[in-house]
Image: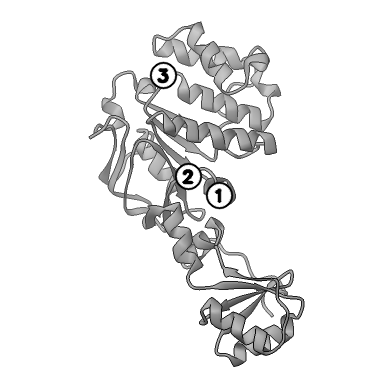
Amino acid sequence: MSDATIEVAGLRKRYGSTTALDGMTFTVVPGRVTGFVGPNGAGKSTTMRIALGLHRADAGRALIGGRPYRDLRRPLSRVGALLDAAAVHPARSGGNHLLWLAHSQGLGRRRVDEVAGQVGLTTAIGRRAGGYSLGMRQRLGIAAALLGDPPVLLLDEPFNGMDPEGIVWMRGFLRHLAGQGRAVLVSSHLMGELQDTAGHVVVVGRGRVIADTSVADLVANASGDRLTVRTLAVEAAARALTGAGAGVAGAGDGALAVHGLPAERVVTALTAAAIPFSEVAPHRATLEEAYLQLTREAVEFRPAATPQESR
């Protein structure tokens, strides 16, 4: 097994009467960003904490490069992690926080300056961490994870608190790290950011894996055979297409979602009814759409419907 691999196999974990993990199984391979997504309570944080030796599983295993975390020598050189960006003493400077961690692994100030530069904190490294914004603390956490130049990274919600410029930077930086041959596991609720960052995704719910596939395949499956039709005559188009045997639903902004008819028959039906249209194109689902379809039955905490939703 590669040193840059995360293997999770058959993890089970209960807290009293609550099942947190129910056979969680997946592998994160080097060279790509793997998104780790699921509703609150799905088991993402528990899985990551077991992989990092912070919690003990009731059954199964979580290995970093073929070994449990507790058996790793100089663990910061094998795996870097960001679990809580707030886990830094507010009175300590960002540089001293990194230096304290570096010294624990036999590393010096030079490495601290290198990782601070990598994450864009060079000019802020001497300031107290208590004055950092959440986005800056995220960068500090990434720098800490990189101190030992590890082949494996586990990052929990790294996009939180980032401004638009920071989000763009984070996307590119995560892809860059994976491109260096690292295994990068990113837990996030921000599907739009993962769609532009991850090549692979592990979707979980109620403590087990629901899907383990490429982002491209997941989006393609969610897109199905649906078409998007854009027209200024939405109601007339809907009647014509329904009459031709299609399933039709409003998609807002002068668009219809159509299924059950190939594109050429949609065009024929609209043309025969003299209905003008500007577009008939395959519908491309977003990662968020695909995720919501998969996890619809796995959401543990669901609010009551709003009046509009219940109509």
Marked residue nearer the N-terminal end (3 or 1): 3
Marked residue nearer the N-terminal end (2 or 1): 1
Residue bearing the label numbered 2: 198
Horizontal arrangement in the rendering, residue 139 relative to residue 255 (left or right) = left
**Residue 58 visible in this rendered orientation of the protein:** no
Horizontal arrangement in the rendering, residue 86 relative to residue 216 (left or right) = right
Q: Residues within 10 Å of mark 2 (few under 14, many from 20)?
A: many
The amino acid at mark 2 is Ala
The amino acid at mark 1 is His
Query: Farthest residue toward the top?
Result: 109
Instruction: Give the residue drawn at x 46%, y 19%.
Output: 147
Instruction: Give the residue drawn at x 63%, y 69%.
Output: 304
Q: Are marks 2 and 1 in contact (CB under 8 Å)?
A: no
The amino acid at mark 3 is Gly
* Quarter where residue 208 is shown: bottom left
Instruction: Give the residue drawn at x 52%, y 82%.
Output: 261
Dot label at residue 255: none
Q: Is residue 81 above or below residue 11?
A: above
Horizontal arrangement in the rendering, residue 44 relative to residue 292 (left or right) = left
Query: Farthest residue toward the bottom?
Result: 243
Nearest the eye: 28 or 106: 28
Gap between marks 2 and 1, in whole Å?
Answer: 13 Å
Instruction: Give the residue drawn at x 52%, y 23%.
Output: 143
Mark 3, mark 2: which one is toward the viewer?
2
Residue bearing the label numbered 1: 189
Quadrant of the drawing holding the C terminus: bottom right
Gap between marks 3 and 2, in whole Å?
Answer: 23 Å
Q: Secondary structure at mark 2?
A: loop
Q: Secondary structure at mark 1?
A: loop
Q: How far from the left and from the top, in percent, is residue 278?
A: 70, 71
Dot label at residue 148: 3
